[in-house]
Amino acid sequence: MPGVSGGYGDWPRLVDLFPWQHAGAQWKRTWPIGETPKLLERRWRALLQADDRAAAFRETEAWTIARPGADLLAGTPLPPLASLTADAPRPPIARIAWRSLDRRWCLADGRLGDRLRPALWRAHGPSQVYLTTLLSSGLSRGPAVMACAEVPDLHHFRGSFGDKGVIPLWRDRAATQANVTRGITSVLEDMFSRTVTAEELFAYVYGCLGHPGYVESLREELAEPGPRVPLTRDERLFRRCAAVGAKLLGLHTYRVRSREGSARCVAPVRAMPEKFSYVDEVLTVGDGIFAPVSAEVWGYEVSGLKVVQSWLAGRMLQRSGRTSSPLDALRPGAWSEVLTQELLELLWVLERSLVLHRAQALLLAEIVGGELVSGNALPAPSEEERLEPRAASR
C-alpha cells in the first residue's frame, strides 16, 4: 500500500491489543463433530453399544476410554467412558465454529477430545465473540481475521496450520472482563474525548482486518507473521470503521440474521447429495439447484480455504477428509430443510460481506493515509494479561 512502507512496523500488534490468545479445540477424532444434533445422538449410542468401545472411540496414547473427564459447558465431573452402560445419558450437544463461516455441532464432553481447551469453554457465554487468524505462519488471499460466536476448532481460520490464533473478546463467561490490554481504551478515550468500549475496539479491528483488501495491500509487510492494526487518531474514521466492523461481526457470527440476498433454492435437494458443482452462477447440490450464485461468492477464500466448497464438502453423503473411527461412517440419512436454509444463509452472508468489503477497503486507505497511533505509545500487556483466565473466573 502506498505510504505504508516504513510505518507498518510501528503499528500496534493485534496480540498486544488483545493480550490473551489461545489455541482452538482439538478433538484428535472426527466423530464427536457433526452437521446435525440427531447424527451425534446416533454416534453416541453406537459408541456405547460397540463390541470394541476403545476402537470405536479411537484411542490415542494420551487419551483412552479409561480417562474421566468433565462436561465442557457445566464443568461437572464425568466418569470414564469405559464404565458407562449402553443406555447412559448422552452428553450435551453444543454448536462449535468448525471452519470460517461453518458452524457444526459437537458432543460437549471433555472425555471425547485430547485438547479441548477448557479455558475457552469456561470463558464462553452468550456475549462472547472470537477472532481467529494465523499468528505463526503467513496469510494469503482473503481476510486477515475471521469472527465466530462459538468455541472455535483449532483449524477454524483456514482448515489447517492452526496455532494460538483464537482471540476472545472476553476473559469470562459473564462478559465483565475484557480481553483488552489495560489502559488502551483510556488512551483512545483521551484522544477522542468520549467513551470507547472494548466492543467498539474489537469492531474497529474487524473493520480494518476482516476483508481481503488488508492482505492485498500489505502483502510484503505480512511476510512477518502476526497482523498489525492501523489505529487511527481520527475519531470520525474510528467510528465509521467500527460501525462497518460491527455489521460484519453480526453477519459472520450469525447473530444478526442476514436479509435475503439474490441466491435462491431453485430446485430442492431431495436426497443426501454425493457431489456438488458450479457453472455459470448455478450451484448444483445433488439434485438441488441454487442460483444465482456469483463467482465472487463461490470463490470466497480465507488463506486458501474456499468457504462455500468447504461447507458443502463436509455435508455430502461421503464427507471429505480423513476418518478416525467406524462411527464416522454414520452419516445423516437425508438432506433437510434446515441444511437448505443454512446454505442459503451462508450464501447471503457472503453476498453482504462482499458489499461491506468494498467499504472496508476504502476506509482502510483513508486510515493508513492519515495520522496513526504508534504501538510504542500504547500500554504494553502484562504477563498476567497474556495468561489464560483462572478457573475461578467461571
Image (cartoon, rainbow, N blue to C red):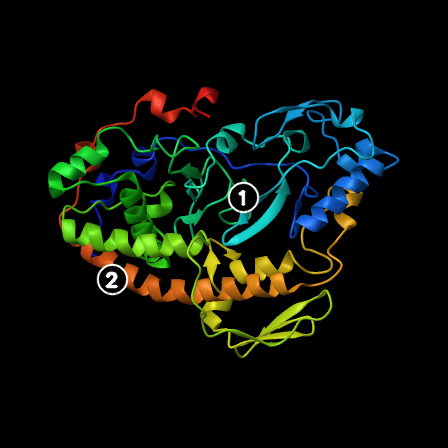
Three-letter code, disc 1:
His
Say left or right for 234 vs 122: left
Three-letter code, disc 2:
Leu
Q: Nearer the viewer, residue 68 or 360?
A: 68
Q: Position of residue 8 (x, y in %)?
A: 24, 45
Image quadrant assignment for residue 185: top left
Q: Residue at x 42, y 48 (%)?
A: 147
Q: Quadrant of the N terminus?
A: bottom left
Disc nearer the start of the sequence (1/2):
1
Q: Residue furthest right?
A: 51
Q: Nearer the viewer, residue 72 or 212?
A: 72
Q: Secondary structure at mark 1?
A: loop
Q: Is residue 72 visible?
A: yes
Numbered-mark total: 2
Q: Residues within 10 Å of mark 1 (few under 14, many from 20)?
A: many
Label 2 sits on residue: 362
Q: Residue at x 50, y 43 (%)?
A: 150
Say left or right for 193 vs 197: left
Q: Position of residue 208 (x, y in %)?
A: 29, 51
Image quadrant assignment for residue 364: bottom left
Mark 1–mark 2 Cα distance, whole angstroms, equals 30 Å
Q: Secondary structure at mark 2?
A: helix
Q: Position of residue 348 (x, y in %)?
A: 46, 66
Label 1 sits on residue: 155
Say left or right for 374 vs 229: left
Q: Is residue 1 visible?
A: no
In the displayed structure, 41 sits above or below 124; it is: below
Q: Residue at x 52, y 59 (%)?
A: 306
Image quadrant assignment for residue 327: top right
Q: Position of residue 229 (x, y in %)?
A: 28, 44
